[in-house]
Amino acid sequence: MNPLLEHLNAPQLAAVTLPPQHALILAGAGSGKTRVLTTRIAWLISTGQVAPPGILAVTFTNKAAKEMLTRLAAMLPINVKGMWIGTFHGLCNRLLRAHHRDAGLPQLFQILDSGDQQAAVKRLLKTLNVDDEKYPPRELCHFINAQKEQGLRPAAVEAWDDWARKRVELYEAYEAQCQREGVVDFAELLLRCYELLERNEPLRRHYQDRFRHVLVDEFQDTNKLQYKWLCLLAGRDPAKPGSMVSNPPVPLPALHSGPAPTAQDSVLRNPVSAPLSEKGGDYSGAPAAPRGACMFCVGDDDQSIYAFRGADVGNMRDFEREFHVTNLIRLEQNYRSHGNILDAANAIIKNNPQRLGKNLWTEAGAGEPIRVHESYGEGDEARFIVEEVKALSRDGHARAEIALLYRSNAQSRALEHALFNAGLPYRVYGGLRFFERAEIKHALAYLRLIANADDDTAFSRVVNFPTRGIGARSLENLQDAAKAQGSSLHAAIPRVSGAGGVKLAAFADLIIRLREAAHLPLPELVEHVLDLSGLSEHYRNEKEGQERLANLDELVNAAASFVAEEGTVGAEGEETGELRADLVAFLAHASLEAGEHQAGEGDDALQLMTVHSAKGLEFNIVFICGLEEGLFPHENSLLEDKGLEEERRLMYVAVTRARQRLYLCFAQTRMLHGQTRYNLPSRFLEEIPEDLVKWLTPRAGKNGYQVADSAAFAYGATPAFAATPRRSDSQRGGGFRVGQSVTHPKFGLGVIINAEGGGNDARVQVNFGAAGIKWLALSVAKLEAA
DNA sequence: TTTTGAGTCCTTTTT
DNA sequence: GGACTCAAAA
């Protein structure tokens, strides 16, 4: 037997060795998804069914792509570096660099990250004198990206009123600005690449012939445009029914002079395109489409948690239908979690309608019960977790194997506070990332100006940083001049006169001097830029500049290791003429891969992160915090179509992160937006069968809190208010307190969220959930403790 | 040009 | 409550 196939279970084996047909693999959490994907590639290659250049494998994150490459390298005696395995954006970047002329892009086009994009939109609104209250940049970016992710250019966007028409107009103006500056945002990377293939038949044919197998990871997270892009590469030509709305064929503006080369030109000239002879190995036909690839899509509709950013689970059904998928394979055996955890996850997700359907099981035993803990407030919740973690630590559990998951980032504060006070090392994921730091972005802006001085985003960022006396007025003059002659800011510098003009000219001179150093090896070039621009100097003089200075040093290191690692890739693409490919590649790398969140990876630290960022990870012990209505499920989600379903999938993802032990925590009160909120326990708690659960605090009543006095709470609850003085017989008597569950004959079950007055005047505010929030006089309303 | 105070917002996030 | 933005004051 092929050693690659050892230790695969039956469905895994079936998936890996599937004959060349389109296939959809429903891979449950912890079912060995990545293993199947990589083994499939290795198997296809090692059995001679396809040569490495015939493979296209797509992921969403750089991490996943890297992981795939690493695993593949361990399985195959080939150099996997040059293979087409990467993120959607990374691969599109590669294609666009190779065929930039055909795509209507300058050779050295720069990539805007979301921050750059927002800055560009802001700048646009300013030059057009558009009220940014009416068209907030954030929202406008979102709109533009959403359109692009649907595959819609401005001409194809429908608008019904003036406001909407203006938005589309701004979208158009934004496109023009990007084109003028030679920059491309994330969504544009995909859309431009899609259009390139759609309109350029020879090029499309070339890649359709080349790629025999297209493999997609996390398929449930693809958006419409990504799906279209995949379809195109897999050999489904654009005009066919079922393909998306087509844009009116607007000719792409060309930035360069001279005759546009044909597609054939760039295919033949370009080293990216493998010789056609390599394409199929001794691939022996079979039922696959005559042209184009076999699609092998791996995903889990139950783990689709990115609808809010355009992901469309519907792609799974569409794919199944449009590609006539007969091979639907379910990977349901879970190798991660104990039985109770899986049972809970299955029970929760069962409440979602319209699933493709799947039930995880394990050969591992039931394991420990799921622990549920109620506390009074978020501080108490955090203290409980701290004590529990300390105990687990004493028992020999590694802290790095314990994760604290929460729905929203704001929740980390209380946890961090308690952890800090307890001296427990922890690491929070999801902060500012390396290439997003201000000082790094400044340095990169200078580097970008070396590559392309017309990059107005980069120009505006550093024209007066460090300050060189170029104030708002000079910039305004410059902007006017640029607008007047329809040029970039840089090109307009000679048109500005006066003192401002002199200073601007000095800046232009700086750019020239930076460009003169463009022959230096990349790390030295970076260093040179830091020096000459005055960035290093600036941070040396700043009180709090030490860390930033260290980061800038780190940038030099990053450049060095980039050259060392990607050195071979530097040869990819065309000769860039006077400017170097490695600089452009490094800048693309900085935009496409923002870098790891922060240092301190080696330490044995608790892992704190949102549920979203925990996707794909696993831990021995998991605490899910803040399991309260309004928080998780988040209140905003209830207003959205299918919002609750997505929250439930999120809960499913959270639960399935745990291998051995799972804690579910909730609190009666929580500080939110500066106000104390009283929430009911999350409905997801109730969806877990009772026999899987062990309550660490007295069990809460259905839909409400346990009526218990504070002593019942392990870590000292401190009720802030009592409508009537609390009495020891409050259970029996009429004493109510904030946070307590009550029933009302008409409104049903609720929780007291506020109170005022006392004695006969006492009134309480009760949240009855669906029945609303009411103020009730205790002397009148027939309230009872639930 | 930098500092400071008021005002605003507030799920989730990768590329 | 707090982080971030933006406009006025030093």
Image (cartoon, coloured by chain):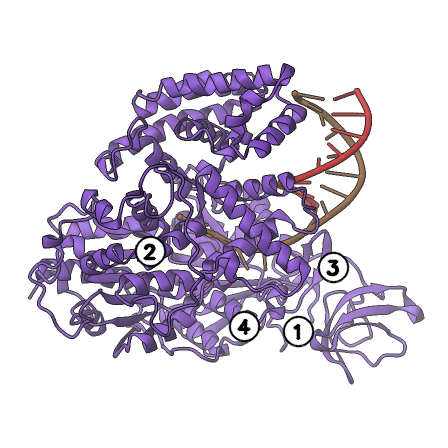
Chain colours: A purple, B brown, C red
Place residue A235 in its image quadrant: bottom left
**Could you give the CA–CA distance between mark 4 and mark 3, rounded to whole angstroms?**
36 Å
- Residue type beneath disc 2: Thr
* Nearer-N-terminus badge (1/4): 4
Left or right: where does residue A330 sit relative to residue A175? left
Q: Secondary structure at mark 2?
A: strand
Disc 4 versus disc 2: distance between alpha carbons? 25 Å
Quote the CA–CA distance across marks 3 and 2: 49 Å
Which of pointers 4 and 2 lies earlier in the amino acid sequence? 2
- Which quadrant of the structure image shows residue A598? top left
Which chain does tag 2 point to? A
Residue bearing mark 2: A59
Mark linked to residue A704? 1
Q: Which mark is residue A232?
A: none
Image mark for residue A642: 4
The mark lying in front, picked from 3 and 2, is: 2
